[in-house]
Each structure stands twice: as C-alpha cells, then as structure tokens.
Amino acid sequence: MSVWLFALTLIGIILAAWWCYTRRLDWQFAHITAQLNKITTKRQVKAAAGKRILSRIYKIINTSLYAGKAADAYRAFDLLKLALGQGLGRPGEPLRLTAAVYLAVKSNQLDIAGHGIDAFRPLLKNMKPGEVPAAVEQLALIAVLSLKKRQNFLAARAVEVIAAGMGAAADEADHASVMRALRLIGLFALRRQDTGLVLELQSKLETWLMAVQSTVSSQEQVAGILSAWLHRIVKTGDASQLAILTQYIDQLVKKGLLTEQAITIIIAECNYLAGMDSRNPYSRLTGAISMTNLELAVQMRTVSIWRQAVDGAGQAARLAIAQRTLTECFAVGYPLFEMGRRLLIAELNAGPLQDSFRQQALYVLVRECLQLIEFVGRQNFAVTAADIIEQIYLDWIKRQGNAGHNKSIKKFCQLLFLYCTRIKRRQKRATADGADFNTGEGITAADREQLKKLGFISE
C-alpha cells in the first residue's frame, strides 16, 4: 500500500512540476514557435489548431500588458504576426487585435500599441475579398481613438497600414471601406489641427489615385473625401488648412488625377460652402473658396462648369453685400474681379491667337460683375454704376498682394464701365461722374479695337 501511495505521490509531483514548467513564458514561446514552424511545412492547417495557437498568444499578450512586461508583449505580438502571416486569422480577428491594441494604449504602453498595429499588415495580406472592410474599419477606429488621446503617431501608424492594405482591396466594397477610413481619419486630424497627418493622408490618397484605374465610383469617393474635408475646414474657420487643401486639389487637377465629374462635385460643394460662409461677417474664408472654385473651373475649360463656378462666386458676394457694404466685404467679391483681370490681360496679350473659351469665360464673368454692381446700386440709390466701379478700383489697389497690377486693375475697371455704358439704353445714370473710366489711360487704342471685336465696346 505504501508503495502505491509513494508512486502516486511521485507522479503527482512530476505532473505538478511539468505543469509549472509549461506555464513558464519561455517554454510557451518556444512551444508556440515550434508549432508555427510545423505549420509552415504543411499545406493545410486545421482550424481548431490555429484557433488554439491564437488563443494562447492573445492570452500571453493580455497577461503581459496587465503585468507591464513589455519584452514579453513584444515577443507575443511577433508570434501573432507570424501566425497571421500563415493565414491563421479567424472571423472577428480584427476586433480581437483592436482590443489588444486598445489595452496597450489604455495602459500607456504606446510603443507596444504601435507594434500591435503593425500586426494588421499580415492580417490584411491574407484576407479574402470582402473581408478587408472589417480590418480597415478597426484601423480607422484605432486612429480616431489615438487622436482623441493625443497620440497622433499611433494614428499615423494606422494610416500607414491602411495605405499598405490598399493593394489588398480587390473590389468596390474594399475600396469604399478604405475611402471611408481616410475620410474619417482626415476629419479628426483636421479637428485636432494635425497638419502632418493631413499631409500624410493627402500623400496616400494621391499615390492611390496614381496607381489605380480611374472609375466613376472611385472618383465620386475621392470627391466626397475632399468635399467633407473642405466642409470641416470652413466650419472651424482654419485659413491655413484651407490653403493646404486647395493647393492639394489644384495639384491633383494639374496632374490629371481628377476627372471632370469629380471636379464638378467639388465645385458644387465650394459654391455651397461659399454661400454658407458669406453669411458669417467674421469669416475670412469665403473669398479663398470662391477663388479656388474659379481657378478649378478655368482649368477645366468647359463653359457649363465655368458658369456654375461664376454663379456661385457671384451669389456668395451678393449674400455678403446684402448684410455689409461693398468695402467691408470686398474680399468676397475679389475673386470675380481678379479672375476677370487675368482673363482680360491674357486676351489683350494674345494678339492674333484666338481662344474661344477664354473669350466666353471673360464675357460670362463681366456679365456677372455687372450684375453685382447693379445689386450694389439697388442697396443705395444715391450712387451710380461709375461710383461703384470707382469704389471697386480704390478698394482693389489697396489690397495686399496687388503690387505691380495697378495698370491691369485699371484696365478691367475701365472695361466694366465701358461695357456698362454699352448695354445701358439710358446712359445718363451709368456715365455720370465716369470721366475717369472713359479716358484712354489704361486701355490703349489697340486694346479698344480688340474689345470692339469682342463686343464689349460699341463703335
């Protein structure tokens, strides 16, 4: 009896010692590594075996994070990357990985959190079409949470992984999920005024546009992203961010990465934003939005798009003038006048070269300027069209950034006056006190001859 009792005791001690030994992290790491090495030599792996391996890895990650053992957490995430690289990811894997990353962020182990974000790379690489959106959505969630906690470098790491996963996006649903993620992260980056992350997002978006074949859906998604970012910037009134984004849009157009349809969507959004912002007497963005709109439209060289942009700029100017004086809101009407000046000088310097779009664009814009002048006149019946044009000229030459353009500014104001007198049947009111604009100074005899041919000046 004593022999059996001794044997059972010995076996129990051995089992207890083995159990304690196998609970050591070093042994667990070695055992999991050995299992993964065996998997690499097999073509197929049972789901149950893969599930057991991943469950053990996540258990080690959570235990290490709670205990604050950074080295063990790093090793566990390395094993997780290896397992996911072998295609062992299960349904719901992005959610489990996000939970592990969030635990690292919550426990202020930020470097480990960044290491965990990198584990999404092999996961995305081995995902089938249709599974990518789940992972991309979790990465977007990680980026947003990181921005909320002021850990912007983690958000940038998530953006890097999303960009790397763009190649895994094989169908429209996958592409749409990536676009939604970039849009959401961009909105939060703008809200946090993280210029670096915004520039990174713009770079990734441009790279993607250059790599993929343009489709109607992709262009609509890109236009939607840019429109949403514009809306956020106008809402916050950030002039520096607006300058960065409008310059970026201009670069995309010049490189031919945006189609006419996408630009039309952006112009329509700019028209809406300019009209909305013009009602705010403290905003300084309306003029910049209208100028961007006109510059985009003139590059498209399509009369219908140009009319749309000019109408939007004119409507924004009228909304502003209805609440303030012309001088107070000159910046809102400035884009119309400045673009008119550029078109006029280009036309006068063209010589015998004919450009039908430029001529039509100048005509449409001059007509819009005259409608604006007429609108200002209805606000104060004591002033004439010549008085209003003279006020425009005085406000214009005082504006910063117009050095060296005074002569061409005078020419455009003269054109407005001369064309105004031409279309008015009763010229007394239009020409009163307008001697300065009817002289030969500014517009030369050769200029007059050319403007006569275009129909702006009567014989």
Image: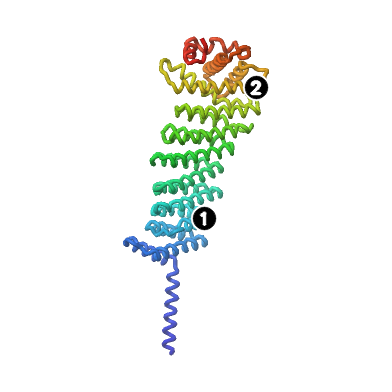
Q: Mark 2 sits on what residue? A: 378
When the figure is inspected, residue 36 is found, relative to residue 264, above or below; the finding is below
Q: Is residue 386 visible?
A: yes
Residue 330 picture location, percent across and down? 60, 25
Task: Report helix, strand or loop for mark 1.
Answer: helix
Q: Which mark is residue 143?
A: none
Report how many numbered discs are placed on residues in the image. 2
The quarter of the displayed image where residue 40 is located: bottom left
Q: Residues within 10 Å of mark 2 (few under 14, many from 20)?
A: few
Residue under the image location 41 percent in, 84 percent down = 7
The three-letter code of the residue at mark 2 reads: Arg
Identify the residue shown where x is 56% and y is 22%: 369
Q: Which disc, if any, is residue 102?
A: 1
Of residues 265 and 447, the one drawn nearer to the viewer in this rendering: 265
* Cβ atoms at labels 1 and 2 below 8 Å apart: no
443 or 310: nearer the viewer: 310
Q: Which quarter of the image is occupied by the N terminus?
A: bottom left
Outermost front residue: 425
Q: Amino acid at mark 1?
A: Tyr
Looking at the picture, how far across and down is residue 318, in whole percent?
A: 61, 27
* Other-residue count near label 1 (Cα within 10 Å), few / some / many at <14 / 14–19 / ≥20: many
The residue drawn where x is 42% and y is 81% is 10
Mark 2 element type: helix
Write the residue at 54% across / 45% down. Answer: 188
